[in-house]
């Protein structure tokens, strides 16, 4: 989910005062929290579920892109060959 800049940008000092509140907000809203220091972004706090979901999404997109590149470069093999390599023949 995309951050709401009116709610999800907080100074690092707020994290130091009440870290549980910030972590729970990230977890409950499924939105990342941008931490700032002297007006500049320095880190992101994100719930674990959302982080893992995004990582899986990135890996899937990379696999699809690699598959499309393999097709373009004619690096494909027949289904029967895949089955044989996996021991399903």
Image (spheres, rainbow, N blue to C red):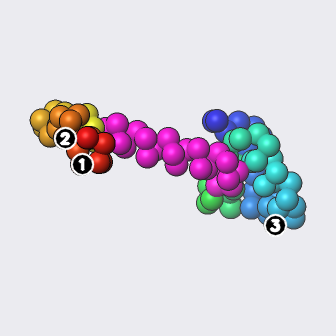
Q: Find residue 81 and report its horizontal and vertical position in percent.
A: 19, 41
Which residue is rendered at x = 50% and y = 41% of the image? Answer: 57
First-in-chain label (3 vs 2):
3
Q: Confirm whether the magenta stretch covers residue 56.
A: yes
Residue 65 visible in image: yes
Q: Quadrant of the C terminus?
A: top left
Residue for point 43% across, 46% down: 59
Q: Is residue 85 above or below residue 42?
A: above
- Which structural element holds mark 3? helix
Q: Position of residue 16 (x, y in %)?
A: 81, 66
Q: Which residues are magenta?
A: 44-65
| Residue 39 in view of the camera | no
- What secondary structure is found at the residue carrying circle 1? helix
Residue drawn 65% across the image and 45% down it: 50
Q: How far separated are the C-alphas under marks 1 and 3?
A: 54 Å
Residue 56, percent from left and from top: 51, 45
Residue at which label 1 appears: 85
- Give the residue pinned by disc 2: 81
Helix, strand or loop: magenta stretch? helix
């Amino acid at each position: 989910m995309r951050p709401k800049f009116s709610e999800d940008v907080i100074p690092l000092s707020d994290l130091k005062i009440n870290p549980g509140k910030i972590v729970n907000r990230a977890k409950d809203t499924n939105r990342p929290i941008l931490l700032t220091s002297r007006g500049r972004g320095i880190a992101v706090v994100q719930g674990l579920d959302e982080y893992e979901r995004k990582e899986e999404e990135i890996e899937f997109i990379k696999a699809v892109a690699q598959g499309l590149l393999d097709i373009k470069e004619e690096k494909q093999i027949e289904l029967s060959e895949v089955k044989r390599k996996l021991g399903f023949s």
